[in-house]
Image (cartoon, rainbow, N blue to C red):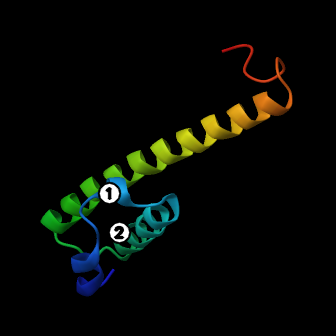
Amino acid sequence: MSRTEDAGAPLDIGSLSFEECFSELEQLVSRFEQGQMALGESIARFERGMLLVRRCNELLGEAEKKVSELLQKVNPGSIGSNA
């Protein structure tokens, strides 16, 4: 990730789509794999990565809930009856 990309990264992770979060996570992993960051930068990027992971999990949970609701409408009683 370049300095320009860093400066352009939205601070409000809550406004990012799943694809945007995942793409940024891939870039962060790539930077970590290169091993060229100072300790402070590594910690800051790790913290951002954890926030991105949390956002991805939230979005996946919402998508899973929506799919379950749609399946329940199509076939009532067979999906989610255990929950």
The quadrant of the picture occupied by the C terminus is top right
Nearer-the-camera pick, 10 or 45: 10
Q: Amino acid at mark 1?
A: Ile
- Which tag, 1 or 2, sits closer to the chain's start? 1
Callout 2 secondary element: helix
Q: Quadrant of residue 41?
A: bottom left
Callout 1 secondary element: helix
Badge nearest the viewer, 1 or 2: 1
Q: Amino acid at mark 2?
A: Phe
Residue drawn at x 24%, y 63% is: 11
Give residue 69's position: percent from left, percent from top. 69, 32
Q: Quadrant of residue 45?
A: bottom left
Residue drawn at x 46%, y 67% is: 20
Residue drawn at x 52%, y 64% is: 19
Q: Quadrant of residue 76?
A: top right
Nearer-the-camera pick, 14 or 43: 14
- On the question of residue 36 being in view, the answer is no
Q: Are marks 1 and 2 in contact (CB under 8 Å)?
A: no
Label 1 Cα neighbours within 10 Å, binned few <14 / some 14-19 / many ≥20: some
Give residue 50's position: percent from left, percent from top. 33, 50
Q: From this viewpoint, which residue is outermost toward the top?
A: 82
In the displayed structure, 75 sits above or below 37; it is: above
Q: Is residue 33 left or right of residue 47?
A: right
Nearer-the-camera pick, 43 or 20: 20
Q: Is residue 23 left or right of residue 50?
A: right
What residue sits right under mark 2 in the picture? 32
- On the question of residue 66 being in view, the answer is yes
Label 2 Cα neighbours within 10 Å, binned few <14 / some 14-19 / many ≥20: some
What residue sits right under mark 1 in the picture? 13
Residue drawn at x 32%, y 57% is: 13
What is the number of the mark on residue 63?
A: none
